[in-house]
Amino acid sequence: MRKPITLAFFIFAAVATPALARQLATPASATSTSTTATASATVEIKANADTLRQNDSASRSVVGHEELVKYGDRSALDAMKRLPGVTVIDGGVRMRGLGNGYTQVLVDGQRMPAGFSLESLAPDAIEKIEVIRAATAEYSTQSIAGTINIVLRKSVDKGAGARAGELKLGTGGGPGLRAPGITLGMSGKEGAFGYNLGASLNATERAYWGKETVASSTPGGAPSGLRTEHSQYAQRFNAANANARLSWALGGGDTLSWNTFLNSGLSRGSEDNRTATLVGPAYPYPLLPAAFRIEAASLRSELALVKRFGGGARLDANFILDSSRQDRRLARQGVRDDVLVLDSLDTGKIHDNTVTVTGKYLVPLVEGHALAFGWDAGRLRNRQHDVRSELTLPGSSLLDTDTRFHATVDRLAVYGQDEWTPRAGWSIYLGARWEGVRTRTEGADFEPVTATYHVFSPLMQTLWKIPGSKQDQLRLALTRTYRAPPLQNLIPSRFYASFNTEVSPDDLGNPRLQPELATGIDLAFEHYFALGGLVSLSATTRSIRDFIRSTTTFDGGRWVSAPLNQGGAEVRSLALETKLPLKTLGVGWPLEMRANLSRNWSRVDAVPGPGNRLDRQPRWSANLGADYSGKTLVTGASYTFVSGGWTRSSDFQSAYDGVTRDLEAYAAYKFDPLRQLRLTIRNLLATDRPSGSRYADAAGATQRLDAGPTYRNWRLQYEQRFR
């Protein structure tokens, strides 16, 4: 098995290398010059997160490392569902209820490579997460809903020592679930050199079942088909993270750093699918066992230089190499009347290699102005190969395919930004960013295709502190953002569905797609309490044109879904965020309460109502929580709610999402300042969340509904720091 060998070699190489230097620059504008300075900056961010947010001209909030690991989550996805203004649905991260490319997720300021998985990223590897509600010029403006920037951890908390380490041992369980894990970390400083090494290994084994019901009817409403499918699943998932950060203080405030991060996941398992046809034509595969294997890995290596000049000018330059791969394998056998009628194998490989060069030059040309100019250029090479092979069997219809293509994506972005305070209590941020993209795709079954687009994004944000009040302030942001067409949607190859129907069609790309463009306005009122805590009420609107939507048609032999630019869309949202320590109310208990509530609206012009919402956007989402911090006992609970319902995506298609209700609680007992034991119980309500889809036209209607149980589970983790 390659993954443990690769990981062991990676860690060994990092430890064996002399400690040249630790990572110097955090993404965005913060820069550290040594291991000790980074540790101090981390503590400062944690201690004054609300103060930094209050005085920042840009609308953003920061959640630090200690907050992210509080619940003992095993993946970044689990931790992110408690972030203010963020929801996690079906493994996707959303702001304002929008995912699918509308919410931009970055890692250290750069887009995630194809093989990078948030499900396999451990919260222990994260230093902080920035939730950026309105676009800034420094990051890509592919952020119609907003940006989430995950900053990877810089060092282990050392306290007063020059060297530090940490160890976390955990295990979890529940009905059909087993989940052990381990995290190791060490960091230190020797003269001008600093280093940080870390690794996390997690394994999950689970067994569960599901049920699918597909019902069809004639135009008059009479049943024409009904079948049910019961499935048993057994799955194993292994995740690994490893990082090495080395830095070297060059003198005069200059620093050189090297950072490498590995993210890896292996999922494998089996399915036993049994279908019973109650009405209508018999399903061709009443018994359909399957086995699958998905292996994904990404490796990022970055060399960063900070060069300081006279007069306070500074240059930040970064050279980044990203490499990722994903290998998929699915084997199925169909049995009908005790006869083998299907024996198929699907394999897929995706390999990405990216070179990125970024830079930012900060120059104090005018007193009181923070001027910055920068660039972001890169080239992505993508290769994909999908093969489906079937044995010739009696009564089967062969569907052998061999689809391969490669794509080159060149991109260039330049930007400028300025932040200044015209007078006391009023600050302004102005920025502009130009981004251009050129994609060239070549494949065996189509002629080479080239697609280009560019977007210019003027940006403005302002913060006004209401006179006579030290705690009340208003924010306003005007933005132009966009959503780029996914690379898969630009490829004119056809990806065949296993069992082709109107609710599971083939997919066909469209190389003529253009990006969706959005003009946005954000307005917020914020009140900060004198002893900590805040109340924020914000409103957002986005007007989108060249909206991309997929339509399903019948080409005479099979159902095909293809994307196209069509019409526009409108998005609106209201959000309430509160964080209230009881000391603010004069109560001496070390208890903090928090709440986030969002109401979302959207409308797609090209789709008739009702329910013509964008990207299956939930109307309501909320997160309520409370945390008690005693001397030896820290405990808390969190409740998450996401509404469901039907969303109409075309004249004939609709999708259904069930309501999400999730209650979890944790408790951590401190043996001493360096050792503690943490217990977390998740999914206390154990509610089901059905989903489905519907296709209805003049020929009749077909509806699919998926359902399955959820279970309570627990996790116990021992944590120790070393100084």
Image: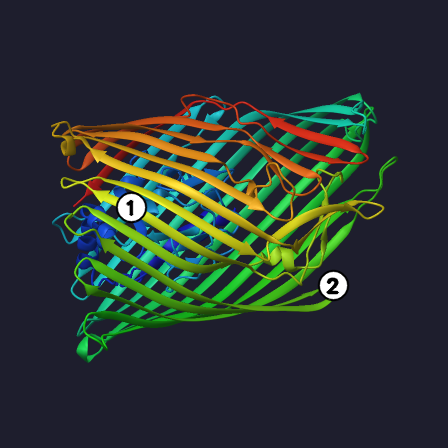
Q: Between tags 1 and 2, which lies in front?
A: 1
Q: What residue type is labelled 1?
A: Phe
Compared across the picture, whether 561 is left or right of 619 comes to right
Residue 131 visible in the shown view: no
Report the front residue among 540 and 618.
540
Q: Tell me residue 237's x, y (percent).
A: 50, 38
Q: Tell me residue 398's x, y (percent).
A: 83, 44
Question: Which comes sooner in the sequence, label 1 or label 2?
Answer: 2
Q: Tell me residue 395's x, y (percent).
A: 87, 35
Q: What residue type is labelled 2?
A: Ala
Label 1 CA crowd tier, 10 Å (few <14, some 14–19, many 20+): some
Report the front residue among 229 and 259.
229
Residue that protrudes farthest toward the front in the picture: 467
How many badges with numbers are in the image? 2
Residue that protrudes farthest toward the bottom in the picture: 310
* For residue 307, above or below residue 156: below
Q: In which quarter of the image is residue 694?
A: top right
Compared across the picture, whether 61 is left or right of 357 comes to left
Residue at mark 1: 525
Q: Quadrant of residue 623?
A: top left
* For residue 66, above or below residue 104: above
Secondary structure beneath disc 2? loop
The residue shown at (52%, 31%) is 644
Secondary structure beneath disc 1? strand
Compared across the picture, whether 405 is left or right of 33 comes to right
Report the front residue among 148 and 231.
148
Q: Which mark is residue 444?
A: 2
Q: Which mark is residue 434?
A: none
Query: Marks 1 and 2, Cα distance to the nearest angstrom?
Result: 56 Å
